[in-house]
Amino acid sequence: MQKNEKEISGVSIQIPVKITLTALEKVLKEKLVGYQIQKEEAKGQQYGEILAINLSNGKPGFDVCIRQQVLMKTVLFKNKTISFSFQLKFDFDEEQQEIIIKDYQVEGEQKAWFTNRLLKAMMTLLMKKKLSGNSKLFLTPKISEFLQQINQKLENIIEVKKGVQLFGTINDFKIQNLYFKEDAVVVLVKLEGNLAAEVSEIELPN
């Protein structure tokens, strides 16, 4: 069969991308399990080591809950394994392409009331210090990197389905909105570019 090729100029597509909390949890585990919590200095005091992480829906008023199990290395809790959770509320700035931590809450999960209060105070203090001037996650560098990777693949032609190939250039990749829904985060993505599709094989239903 003769190949049919159709070129599409100035394509603009909106795609909702659903990322499950399970997928995000896997990434967090790979990045953070084994991480040493310590002061910023190279030889700063160590507070603990992250042993486990679990991601779940946040309680009312929050988007997500990050539960952590930490082996403490402070004087008061040395070699004691404790659990606590961060409730996080996010906001998204489309113009700046950044995720903002709008609100957070630390909760202890120990049986002893005093231990919970002490851990909550300590972790809240650490969280405030960590977020001081750094409560935003700029997505532009990652988007630029992702856009470069996509265009490199498109140069070599991508087979999106048997007999259907896609090639061209994506000029703009922008996140229009980002929000949490049930057990996932939904990212509304807008793509703009010049693409062409080549069909070399057509399968008709029986």
Image: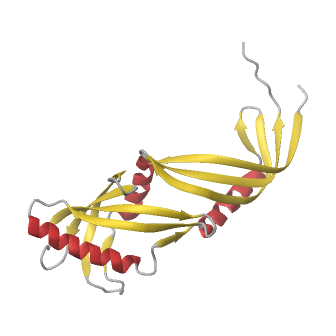
User: Relative to 84, is 195 on the left or the right?
Assistant: right
**In the image as oriented, which residue stretches furthest toward the top?**
206
Q: Tell me if I can see residue 79 in this picture.
A: no
Rendered position, 72 above or below 173: below
Q: Quadrant of the N terminus?
A: top right
What coloring was used for the rendering? secondary structure
Residue 65 visible somewhere in the drawing: yes
Q: Quadrant of residue 103?
A: bottom left
Q: Residue at x 46, y 77 (%)?
A: 134
Q: Is residue 104 rendered to the left or right of residue 46?
A: right
Residue, far front: 61
Asked if residue 96 is positioned above or below residue 29 in the image, the reply reads: below
Q: Is residue 91 left or right of residue 140?
A: left
The residue at the point 48 percent across, 68 percent down is 100
Would residue 198 be found to the left or right of residue 95 on screen? right
Q: How many marks?
A: 0
Residue 36 place in picture, x, y as percent: 31, 72
Where is residue 114 shown, x and y percent of the image?
9, 69
Judge by depth and name the residue closer to the eye, 1 or 160.
Answer: 160
